[in-house]
Image (tube, rainbow, N blue to C red):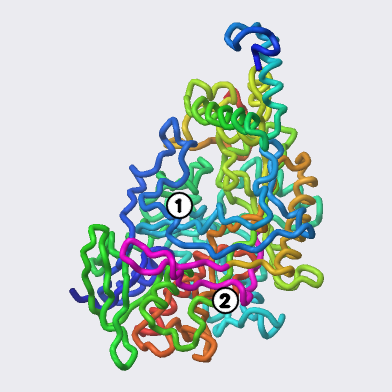
Amino acid sequence: MCLEAFGAKFVALGQDQKNSIIRTLDDIPETNMLGWFFRAVRGDIFFYYYAQPESWALVGVTDTPQPNGHENVTTLWDRNG
Amino acid sequence: MNADVVIVGSGAGGSAAAWALTQRGINCTILEAGPHYDFATDYKLDQSNWEQHGFPEKIPTAGRQVFAPMQKLSKRWDHLRSWNHIRGPSNVTGVRTARGGYKHVVGVGGTTLYFTGEYHRMNRRSMRMRSDFGVAADWPLTYEELEPYYTQAERLVGTSGGGADHRRPRSDGYPLPPLPMSYATRQLQKGHEALGLTFESNPLAVLSKPFDGRPSCNFCGNCNRGCPHGDKGSADITFLWHANATGRCRILTDATVINLEKDSGGRIRRAVYARQDGTIDAISAEAFILAAGAIETPRLLLNSDVATGSGHVGKHFMESLVWTSVGIHPDQIGSHRGHPSDGICWDFNDPDALDSIVGGFRLSPGTAEANLVGPINYAARIVGGWGAEHKERMRDLFGRALALTAFGESLPNDKSFIDLDPDHQDAFGLPKARIHSFLPDHELERLTAMRATVRKVLAASQVSDPVEEFGTYDDFDSTHVFGTCRMGQDPATAVVDPNGRCHGSANLFVCDASVFPSSGGGESPSLTIAALAVRTVDKAWA
């Protein structure tokens, strides 16, 4: 797909070209094998990436659910607190 | 080996029976097919990969039962199909699936290890479904007869609550005050109130204050993954802990009962049990209590050809009828925090709450039980996409998913039952239980009403149009199962008598949800199972 569109492999593409390829994959329905494969790989990436505590700062989470649980659950969430 | 009483299963019913027996000075032995779980070490919520795991099953439960072919799906009910805005439809076939399966735990404490701690009394009107509504069967005892046992069980586990619902009157207040409602749940409360509905604290076997040597809940939101904190009143750290403290309760793990031997008079002489290494043993007792749940208890009776005279063992199977819708709230409500089920609406719980549809339902928060409490599920089910845009949306949306769930009445029908599968055996060569499940139109009409109400309340709670919805129309997914050893006066139509004693077998009792003549309008059954078990012991060993 990359060779057809841009004449180079994915790793050699610029960011806009990479985005274009990924957008094309994302638009393929899951009933198509390529669409299914893209979603399966993306699901695996999410599964392992967000199991790393280093990734949690993105969403404002600082700790595992236990042993400390959550404080101030009755108030609006202060994601920086 | 001998005991005064042998109990098969250590979940909500078996544990409560053991406690009640030991309080009377009676020795009991529990035969539990699974292992012990150590609440302090077996659960993974303090590990970085906590979200990759559900409840850490030591004995896998998938495949322990078999499903008969499921019903075809109809265009008429397409609105009840499960879907996600990223993944699309959950079931792309034309036939109902059983991917959700029968959710249960095999181990000491049973499925209470997995539950969120909802501790509900039955709606007293739901106990007269035949007399008042012409469906299911009446309970052969009144709410008032059961009430003192509800109170005993609530006190033992330390139940938190605060509502004053007239459908389930109380002789005493709750032992503990209600858990504080999370900010996210209060948004649902506002939505209910905007529609003129009542939304109150949910009665929970979860501690709002330290009690009985256990700490109060710290609101991690993950009861279904197993509570490592010790505040959730699972059977292992409540009823069984107190039963063990008497020195009169012995628990044998890895002991799967494979046969009940009876004498010519129909009394049970011995329970034969097998261990995973293949060894077989047997235990004699004066009495036997079955508490293996509404699927494995009838299976044991059928495999042993015990109490089968009425032809009703395995019949009248009732399952979980559930609908959940998930949307996005406009504010940073932090919906991953708080107890998963800290509020409830009983307004539709009466059997005649819906026009021309018999059977009620209740509403409660569903975000945590929908497993939307961590970034993995947000990424896969809420956000999707990729690259910088994905990350920006993760930053924006995390903690804003808000789900509402409706649990409904399940009425028995002739096509829903448990039997023995002639083609599939367990490791000991015994036929597995086969689950026949069918949802007739009146169940799907109720599910349709549940869906409409959930959507309406979410909209009134400022939540967006749904981004995910799932229900039990296109996928069998049941934690609460009932009815397969119905309780009743008449031996011709019931398996056990009003006190839980098997018709035709004087020393055999059933103490689990298989005795329920009706399911209730969405109540979680653990408390009623425990109360019935305590009552059965009280009546038989008065």
Task: Name, please, the residue furthest toward the left.
Answer: B1
**Mark number, residue B316:** 2
Q: Chain of mark 1?
A: B
| Above/below status of B306 relative to B1 | below
* Residue A58 locus on image (x, y percent): 58, 22
- Quick one: B273 or A40, which is closer to the camera? A40
* Residue B64 locus on image (x, y percent): 42, 59
Q: Quadrant of the N terminus of chain B?
A: bottom left
Judge whether residue B514 can be spotted in this image. yes
User: Which stretch is magenta?
Assistant: B407-436
* Residue type, numbered disc 2: His
Q: Quadrant of the C terminus of chain B?
A: bottom left
Q: Is residue B111 left or right of residue B347?
A: left
The crowding category of the residue bearing disc 1, from other C-alpha atoms within 10 Å (few below 14, some 14 to 19, many at least 20), is: many
Which structural element holds mark 1? loop
- Quick one: B117 or B451, which is closer to the camera? B451
* Residue type, numbered disc 1: Lys
The residue carrying mark 1 is B232
